[in-house]
Amino acid sequence: MKIAEIYGLHYKTPKVGESTILYQLKRNGINRRDPAAHIRKVTDEMVDEWVRRYKSGESLKRIAGSTVSALTVWNHLKSRDIKLRDRVEAQIQAVRKHERKPFLGNNTEKAYLMGLRYGDLDAVRHGRAIRVRVSTTHPAMANLFQTLFSSYGFVHRYPREADFTGFEWTLEADLDQSFEFLLRKASVHELHGFSSFEFKFFLAGLFDAEGTLSLHRKKFGKSFEFCINSVDAILLEFIRVRLSDAGFHPIIDSRNQDPERLGYHKEGRMLRLSLFRKSEVCRILQEVHPKHPERLMKALLITQEFCSNLAPMREETVQKWVDLGRSIKQERDEFVEEARLSLLATKSLRGGLRSRNLG
């Protein structure tokens, strides 16, 4: 009938028109198309791609394009036991500005993120998304956040005022619901289920969030110290036991926190788990691999300049350590200043727009 309409042919009924067109096509040697031909041409590779695109949030109509119908895509997805979105969710996916991809990491990547969650990384439910957020004055942490989450969703960055440094940057990303495991900090009971290999990745994430490498004086010279700081006594005791079982000799001590640290008076104690022995500091840095750029630079300096040398620490190594600390501080100060200038520019722009609207 579409052919008849295009050429302006009119018949008593649509059926008469269809029969007439088919008769003329057949008379001129043109065979009728098989309505199921496009279904038989669907390959496994095509369906694999449809599955990937559907899981990434694309609609059936968009996946089908002009090649096949949305119903064909739907039937093949069902044959793969793919859980189809309801109509409301599909509409939300269609209008979403930024694509969200499901978490596809293995158990070690998940363990690392669970360790990072014990630090400044925050996660809340935001509509149908899992919003992860961190506020920092260190460009290294901002780069780490970007590296970890940019492949799963869009990372937004904005400046804000801060109590201690004056200004800082907040980074956040809205992620797929497969990141629900970040909504709360894992209990120690859950952490007991980690294999020794997974535990090292968890410890790496925790170290990137709450760890430090520091230079301290010993009785016969200087050495390095591996520390993890936390107010969670149960967590540190769990780590102490796991490290002790692996042949380490960790020590847990505590110190009073500044009662005015939060802008109001609140007393508290900070716990610290430490490794002091040279052999153990070197070993932990070989087995637990940080991803935080600052931690990584310090770890590389220690392993290359300190661990590989049987003699006492050289003054050259101490100077490299001091220079690295100065470089990190300079980058932090520049990052804070960048946040200050960006926030001032934003406020100035908003003020200008407000004045224009009032005028």
Image (cartoon, rainbow, N blue to C red):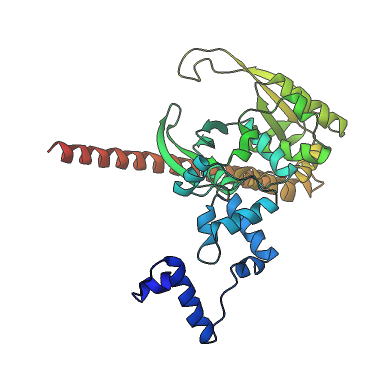
Whole-percent x, y for residue 342 in the image: 36, 42
Residue at point 47% right, 45% down? 91
Can residue 241 be seen by looking at this rendering?
A: yes
Can residue 315 be seen by looking at this rendering?
A: no
Does residue 113 lie above or below 36 as drawn?
above
* Furthest residue toward front: 12
Q: Quadrant of the C terminus?
A: top left
Does residue 22 lie above or below 63 as drawn?
below
* Furthest residue toward left: 359
Pick the front one: 26 or 150? 26
Residue at point 57% right, 45% down? 149
| 318 sits left or right of 153 in the view | right
Pick the front one: 74 or 314? 74
Pick the front one: 191 or 142? 191
Rendering quarter of residue 206: top right
Pick the front one: 153 or 147? 153
Whole-percent x, y for residue 75 in the image: 63, 54
Residue at point 78% right, 36% down? 199
Residue at point 48% right, 43% down? 92
